[in-house]
Image: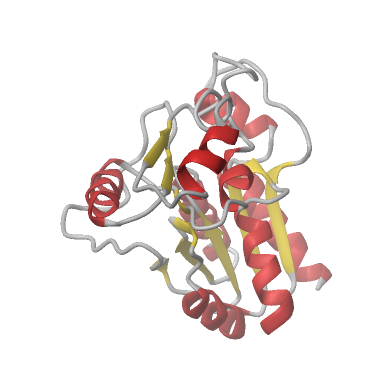
């Protein structure tokens, strides 16, 4: 993903999007969990780059099964599209029977106290964080927002009205990513307290995926801790 869309963004903008070409761009090695390859190969800016392009859709599947379904859906879709995925083995969260629709987020766990919204393999940590919170009598909803553009406004608005607090989690720069997309939408429609967890204007580094998830604040324990502080503060 550092090379495509990274190095060829201008060609994607002008040749593909401006001309409305039916081209699909696939970016691998995205996110901090790429691990030992280090900062040069841990693409964190791709969501912001691609989401800003007119007519470009952006999909970040959570696991193997969802990646297969997203690939088939993109093959049927007419127009420019970008899909990103990671490098490391990914926990299996969906099955062959789990539905997939471009632009339709999935509620993986119901809740009432806050909603955790993530995209990509980090969803596994979001679900584990919800389990930690449940032990402290905090009932968290978890949403897999696999399509960042177009955003599922209906599901996100309903979750905001129900839970009143939102935490977004993404292995990407928080500027222009999933959290930014949700914040932009809700600020105009239904202002809601939002805590964004992501890379905060910094690059990654070499290490094992687990080490990096802990260091940069993507572990389930960190997400749960931030959720508790967020609810108490608000």
At x 65%, y 57%, the residue is 179
Q: Nearer the viewer, residue 93 or 42?
A: 42
In the rendered structure, the answer to whether residue 72 lies left or right of residue 178 reads left
User: Compared to 197, does 157 lie above or below?
Assistant: below
Residue occupying the far right of the picture = 233
Residue occupying the far left of the picture = 97
Q: Nearer the viewer, residue 19 or 200?
A: 19
The quadrant of the rendering that contains the C terminus is: bottom right
Quadrant of residue 40 in the image? top right
In x, y percent, where is residue 76? Answer: 23, 55
In x, y percent, where is residue 232? Answer: 78, 69
Scheme by which the image is coloured = secondary structure
Quadrant of residue 89 in the image? top left
Q: Nearer the viewer, residue 50 or 215?
A: 50
In x, y percent, where is residue 189? Answer: 67, 83
> How many discs mark residues in the rendered view?
0
User: Compared to 162, does 42 lie above or below?
Assistant: above
Visible residue check, residue 220: yes
Visible residue check, residue 190: no
At x 60%, y 55%, the residue is 178
In the rendered structure, the answer to whether residue 47 lies left or right of residue 70 reads right
In x, y percent, where is residue 54? Answer: 56, 56
Quadrant of residue 216 in the image? top right
């Amino acid at each position: 993903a550092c090379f495509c869309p990274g190095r060829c963004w201008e060609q994607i903008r002008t040749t593909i999007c401006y001309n409305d070409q039916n081209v699909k761009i696939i970016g691998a090695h995205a996110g901090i969990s790429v691990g030992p390859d280090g900062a040069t190969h841990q693409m964190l800016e791709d969501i912001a780059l691609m989401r800003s392009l007119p007519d470009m859709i952006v999909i970040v599947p959570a696991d193997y099964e969802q990646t297969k379904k997203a690939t088939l859906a993109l093959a049927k879709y007419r127009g420019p599209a970008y899909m990103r995925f990671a490098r490391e083995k990914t926990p299996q969260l969906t099955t062959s029977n789990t539905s997939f629709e471009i632009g339709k987020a999935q509620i993986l766990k119901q809740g009432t106290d806050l909603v955790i919204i993530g995209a990509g393999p980090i969803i596994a940590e979001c679900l584990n964080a919800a389990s930690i919170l449940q032990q402290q009598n905090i009932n968290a909803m978890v949403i897999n927002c696999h399509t960042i553009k177009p955003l599922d406004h209906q599901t996100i608005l309903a979750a905001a009205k129900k839970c009143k607090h939102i935490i977004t989690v993404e292995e990407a720069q928080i500027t222009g990513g999933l959290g930014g997309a949700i914040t932009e939408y809700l600020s105009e429609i239904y202002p809601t307290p939002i805590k964004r967890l992501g890379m905060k204007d910094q690059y990654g580094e070499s290490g094992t995926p687990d080490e990096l998830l802990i260091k940069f604040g993507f572990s389930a324990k960190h997400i749960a801790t931030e959720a508790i502080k967020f609810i108490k503060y608000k």
